[in-house]
Amino acid sequence: MRMRELAVGDAYEITADQHRDDRGLFMEWYRFDVLAETVGHPLELRQGNLSVSRKMTVRGIHFADTPPGQAKYVTAVHGAVRDYVVDIRVGSPTFGTWDAVDLDDQTRSAAYVAEGIGHCFVALTDDAVVTYLVSGVYDPQHEHGINPLDPEIGLEFPFDHEQLIVSQKDRDAPGLRAAADSGLLPDYAQLQEFYASLGGPSVIGGAA
């Protein structure tokens, strides 16, 4: 399993080896120890989510109040999506920038998104099935959104904006600047302290 940090720090693309034979294939799509060794702390799993989306559906940009926030480990088990990470952490050296990876049922890559980073995807196929392992249970009072069509962020979608299927809630979400001005966005320095607090005894092999 290989992890590549994206242009937004604290977000990674994960690529695993697929072992094929005449029966099909087998792979390890999540390894808590490899993730912990790379990001500096384990992912404490609290909830598993699954979504099914029509082609050109956009979900996001979403994030949760921090701390504790909600880290995500995302993969597509059927079809394909383009997965975006957006740095919405005020004070970050890459604030307002984004990166994207394609997740699909061929490469079977995954993405890790740390707490406080905005997350979004667009379905590239019909019946795109995405699963998320997350570090916190859903709490609507602490969940927020940024408009995925905000021109200041400038997410590049592979479809015309007029074709995109976006929920009214996401369309009504504020842009990046309005969210920052309202104090809605997470603070980068505080998050770095929070990430560090999640470390502890080594989880590799269960040794202390």
Image: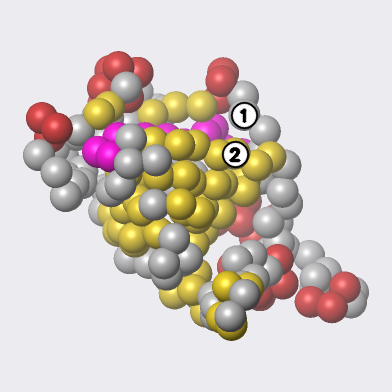
Q: Mark 1 = which residue?
A: 138
- Is residue 60 visible to the viewer in this orientation of the structure? no
Whole-percent x, y for residue 31 in the image: 68, 69
Q: Secondary structure at mark 1?
A: loop
The stretch in magenta equals 55-68
Q: Mark 1: which amino acid?
A: Tyr
* Foreground residue among 44 and 184: 44
Check whether the beta carbons of the residues at disc 1 and disc 2 lie within 8 A of each other. Answer: yes
Q: Mark 2 = which residue?
A: 49
Q: Secondary structure at mark 2?
A: strand
Cα distance between the residues tagged 1 and 2:
10 Å
Considering every residue shown, the one lying at the far front of the view is 22
Mark with earlier residue (1, 2): 2
Q: Is residue 58 magenta?
A: yes
Q: Is residue 88 left or right of residue 147?
A: right
- Is residue 143 visible to the viewer in this orientation of the structure? yes
Q: Nearer the viewer, mark 1 or mark 2?
A: 2
Q: Is residue 189 magenta?
A: no
Q: Mark 2: which amino acid?
A: Asn
Q: In which quadrant is the N terminus drawn?
A: bottom right
